[in-house]
Amino acid sequence: MTTTLDHDPVQEAELIAGQNDAFRHSILGNTPVADAPKGQFVMTRGVAALGPDAQLAVTRSVATFDSFNADSDPHGWHEMGVIDLDGTTIWFKIDLYDADYQYGSPEPSDPAQTRRVLTLLLPSEY
């Protein structure tokens, strides 16, 4: 098994970004579930209160999001983004946990040891 200590930071970021992208794409079936890293997709009460049409629209936007830049993605992990839905700002954030969802992942680039939680939230809920 390869550990994160075996990777240079650029290679590590590329691995994690690719896994985060595959996970995001899988929320709408754009990546076969068997190929996507394991995880959960959740939203806050504020996003849920926007209604099912808005939830679907923002989920589609998150699944296809590709506007990462140095300001919004300083580590290159593709872990956070901002969606504008008809004037409402919605954030998405991917957190990397251990296999039991209790602590941070011991090896963020190892899908066997990492579980993702993608959260949709309003900035006021952060």
Image (cartoon, rainbow, N blue to C red):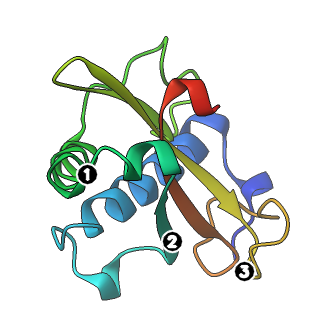
Which residue is found at the position 77% from the left and 82% from the top?
100
Label 1 environment density (alpha carbons within 10 Å; few <14, some 14–19, many ≥20)? few
Among all residues in the image, which is located at the extreme top? 71
Disc 3: which residue = 99
Amino acid type, callout 3? Ala
Which residue is found at the position 22% from the left and 81% from the top?
32
Amino acid type, callout 2? Gln
Query: x, y percentage for residue 82?
Result: 37, 26
Residue 62 visible? The answer is yes
Distance, label 1 to label 2, CA atoms, is 20 Å
Is residue 43 shown left or right of residue 66? right
Q: Quadrant of the N terminus?
A: bottom right
**SS under mark 2:** strand
Q: Depth check: give the residue in front, 87 or 10.
A: 87
Please tell me whether residue 79 is drawn above or below residue 123 in the rendered image.
below
**SS under mark 3:** loop
Disc 2: which residue = 40
Please tell me whether residue 8 is drawn above or below residue 114 in the rendered image.
above
- Nearest to viewer (mark 1 / mark 2): 1
Residue 51, numbered circle: 1
First reached walking from the N terminus: tag 3 or tag 1 = 1
First reached walking from the N terminus: tag 2 or tag 3 = 2
